[in-house]
Amino acid sequence: MLYESMRMAWGAICSNRLRSLLTMLGIIIGVAAVIAMVSIGMGVRKSINDSIGKLGGNLLIIMPGATNRGGVQTAAGTAITLTYADAEAIKKQVKHIKCVSPIVSNSCQIVYENRNWVSNVYGVTPDYMEIQSLSVRGGSFITENDLMKRNRVAVIGKTVAKKLFSLENPVGKNVRVANSPYRVIGVLKSKGKSNMGQNLDDVVIIPLTTAQERMLGITNVQSIDVQVDEQSKMHQVQSDIKRLLRQRHQIIGTDEDDFTVENMASIIEAMSKTTSIITLFLGSIAGISLIVGGIGIMNIMTVSVTERTREIGIRKALGATFFNIMVQFLIESVVISVTSGIIGIVIGYFIASLISIVGEFSIVITIPVILIAFLFSVGVGLFFGVYPAKKAAKLDPIEALRYE
């Protein structure tokens, strides 16, 4: 009986192809929209998390505060309050610290023979390599000896190597950074672009002390990166660093800190919550299309019941029960929604893929999302198919046979 009901349902759908196709469009659009919207939302969340995660989920970034000139508050990070000694004190006196790297940076012209390129030059310590998850594809990274002797050595990114050296091996060659000679001791492996479009390979890394004294002529640092050994200790270490720096900077009582300590784990968590809400919002909007499609199914099935009243009367006269008629019309509704769901999944995948190619970001399509969208489409077909099925099953066979 089930097979026969399915065969009859498919026959009824095929006999009105255009109407069935128009009915299916609502579900197809709904499922495709849910798949595309949720996949794009999850892809954006993953891209943001990966971009921030490249800095490390257990990373603290210490920035100087803002200056106050003539009653005018300047931007955060403009004060000259952090020093290399602060970074050394943090590394020695605060527990659960894995790596510490004070940083200074500047945009400089890099020259090799008759080629030149403007790049970001970072003055760092050897710990910077582990903090930023860097690796060297040729040569070596800066060492404590380079830091102590203020050596004029540089490690360059892939973009800088390509612009200045083309196919040559840069290691061992001399370049001019801000009109001073530096020996290239290493080339970094490519890291690509950040989520904001920044080229992470367009960098030149030199020893912190060299950058401070020989390039910039300063004694302060612009930021301090601190990597904590355990994720669970982040907030404790953050509090300990604040306490230590307040003591070192002689900040008493309720006086405002002249620095800020940013917790990357908190930023990642906040961004994840925000993108999750956006993804849920997009999925909910797309889900409305499924409801509209379900109403379309109910409308068409109701019309179908009216058109087939005489047929229903004949079936009931031949012994078809209430259950038989209900199953027949419910199967028609489910076949429409299942077929629409499968087509919608395929279309949704292609739409999401196309948008990801145009927007240059990855999408995340998971089995649970596909299953939820598909089962929801089937549920919509069942729910909105019940009323017309019941209407058909309750028809009086004598009145149905008289129907013209």
Image: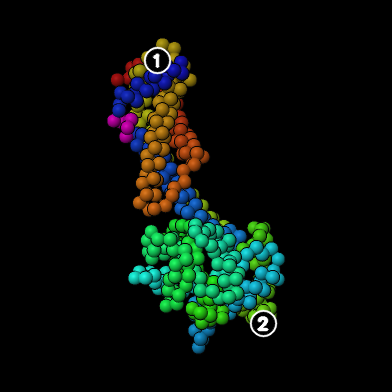
- For mark 2, give the secondary structure: loop
Q: Residue at x 44, y 17 (%)?
A: 3
Asked if one can make out residue 61 in the rendered structure from this viewpoint, the answer is no
Residues 337 and 265: in front is 265
Where residue 332 sits: x, y (%)?
40, 26
> Is residue 20 inside the magenta stretch?
yes
Residue at the outermost top position: 318
Q: Which mark is residue 250?
A: 2
Q: Relative to 370, does residue 360 appear above or below in the rendering?
A: below
* Amino acid type at mark 2: Gln
Point out the image quarter for the C terminus.
top left
> Is residue 58 inside the magenta stretch?
no
Residues 198 and 77: in front is 198
- For mark 1, give the secondary structure: helix
Where residue 71 sits: x, y (%)?
51, 86
Residues 16 and 123: in front is 123
From which residue to which does the magenta span run? 18-22
Specify whether 339 is left or right of 280. left
Q: CA distance from mark 2 to mark 1?
A: 93 Å
Disc 1 crowd rating (10 Å Cα; few below 14, some 14-19, many 20+) is some
Q: How many marks?
A: 2
* Amino acid type at mark 1: Arg
Q: Which mark is residue 315?
A: 1
Where residue 69 sits: x, y (%)?
51, 86
Q: Residue at x 40, y 15 (%)?
A: 315
Q: Residue at x 49, y 57 (%)?
A: 137
Residue contact between numbered discs 2 and 1, judged by CB atoms under 8 Å? no
What's the magenta bit mostly, secondary-structure-wise? Answer: helix
Closest to the camera, between mark 2 and mark 1, is 2
